[in-house]
Amino acid sequence: MGVSFGGTAYVSYSRRDEAAHRVVTQLQEAFKDEWVDLKVDINEVRVRESFDEFIKEIGDADCVIVIFSENYFSSFYCMLELANALKKGDTVKRIFPVFADQMYRFDGSKEHWIRHWEAVKNDWHGENPPNESEKVFGSLAECELILQQLGANFPDSLCGSNFFDDFARRVAATIPACNESLVDWVKETYFHRISNSPNFDDARIYLGRCSEYVRSTLRIKTPKDIPDNANDQIAYLSKIAIPDMFDIFFKMNKEVAKEHLPEDQIRQYQHELATLLNKLLPALFSPATLPQLREICDCEEVEIIEIPHATRVSAELLMAGVDQREASFIVRESLNKRQLYPGRYNLRLPPEGGSSSPTQDIDDDLANQLGQKSVEVNKVLSRCDQYLFQGVAEPEPSTDYTPEQSRILTQDALADKKELEEPRLYWVLSMSREVSQERWDKIIRHIQAYYPQIVLLSLAGGFDQERTEKKFFTKLKHIIPTNNPTSITP
């Protein structure tokens, strides 16, 4: 699935170890049908700046799979990954140790590796260090961090434990015997964090307020050993794969429609199901993704944000999670076909010529115009200004404003929305269109210069991810109630 949904498990191993390579291949095979993303380190081929980014990610990760071997302990990059992962704490809960070789064990190796890395530190940072050692290898602080986590005696160390002592409490697994248990551990570790997240509080409270009919129907769809309370019901829904969760809601929705109930009751129950689903979906993203993206969205100097998605639907779910709101969708019906679109927070330019087709992709029109003469680009920008003015500023009827006045009123309205901490408006740009980058840059600069509160997104997922996401959302459009297209104003 990639990183669009669910958790991310990091794999740390030495690329110099053929046995570790085989283990990684087996793990990738074990995870290929899971919706948890397996992020494998490629440290030996990274530039230092890129490696530093991975170090930060693995240090904050909830799930880290470490494939131990002789080469792993002698690799600076591997040991720095491990040291940063251990520094966060909760070692046994967050790190799953795997031996590349069944015969490899920790027994008696602690002191050996402490001496090894003390010698490395002295070699790199002693009286006669190699030239530019901090750029080629590691800094003194990084070497000492490795030694701290190995259990060396550093009086000023803030690290209270070391991995030899932590991992000695359990037997490390071997491949392929651990495949199933490792996948289960990753899921349980991730979902233990996410099911207790305050992101689910709203869904728990709402389920408790739903009608008895909806709550009893949900109980029938969950395993018998799940306790009969809203917290455990929500925890169960957060633990299953998203396609399975969609399937549950889809079947419940169909069962409600088949019941011999008054029409107003059917609409009520289906509305409750759709609302509950909308409260659940944004919370299902990796806990590390949302605050990171929220921070980027709040930075007005960032022109356009590339997100790991391939469809607009998944982009709406992510932005809903970022703003801690329910997902907002529009279901349009045309030629007996239901299509799902992002709702009120996703900006869409009006189609050229006022086309009445409800299924026209409005960005197609924009791309077509941007691909024409420069004068057409200016018309796009002018029409963009007017569209935002009408939708965001809510001008007084029958009042004439100059273009500059209209733009100022739009800017004021966007500033007020941000000050009131209302959900932000965003626009997904179809950057893959056959349009020159220069013209895309022009409209990006225009939006950024005059309306920095609007978040510009670019979808980064490839064809395989797009295909997978569309499969996920096949049933979603039948669960979300049909709405008339709404304005961009929340």
Image (cartoon, rainbow, N blue to C red):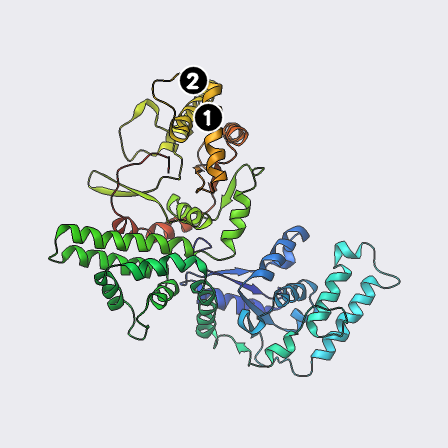
Q: Residue furthest right?
A: 127
Residue bearing mark 2: 401
**Where is residue 114 drawn, in percent x and y?**
74, 74
| Number of marks in the rendered image | 2
| Left or right of residue 332: residue 422 | right
For the residues labelled 2 and 1, the Cα–Cα distance comes to 10 Å
Observer-nearest residue: 69 or 198?
198
Quadrant of the image containing the C terminus: top left
Mark carried by residue 409: 1
The residue drawn where x is 61% and y is 77% is 166
| Left or right of residue 404: residue 361 | left
Observer-nearest residue: 379 or 73?
379
Label 1 crowd (10 A; few <14 / some 14-19 / many >=20): some
What amino acid type should be assigned to the residue bearing mark 2?
A: Tyr
Q: Secondary structure at mark 2?
A: loop
**Where is residue 351 drawn, in percent x and y?**
34, 27
| Left or right of residue 24: residue 157 | right
Quadrant of the image containing the N terminus: bottom left
**Where is residue 329 drawn, in percent x and y?**
33, 44
Observer-nearest residue: 371 or 482?
482
What amino acid type should be assigned to the residue bearing mark 1?
A: Leu
Observer-nearest residue: 363 or 487?
487
Compared to residue 22, the image places residue 368 above or below, namely: above
Label 2 crowd (10 A; few <14 / some 14-19 / many >=20): few
First in sequence, mark 2 or 1: give its number: 2
Q: Secondary structure at mark 1?
A: helix
Query: Are circles 2 and 1 on residues that touch, CB within 8 Å?
Result: yes
| Left or right of residue 409: residue 251 | left
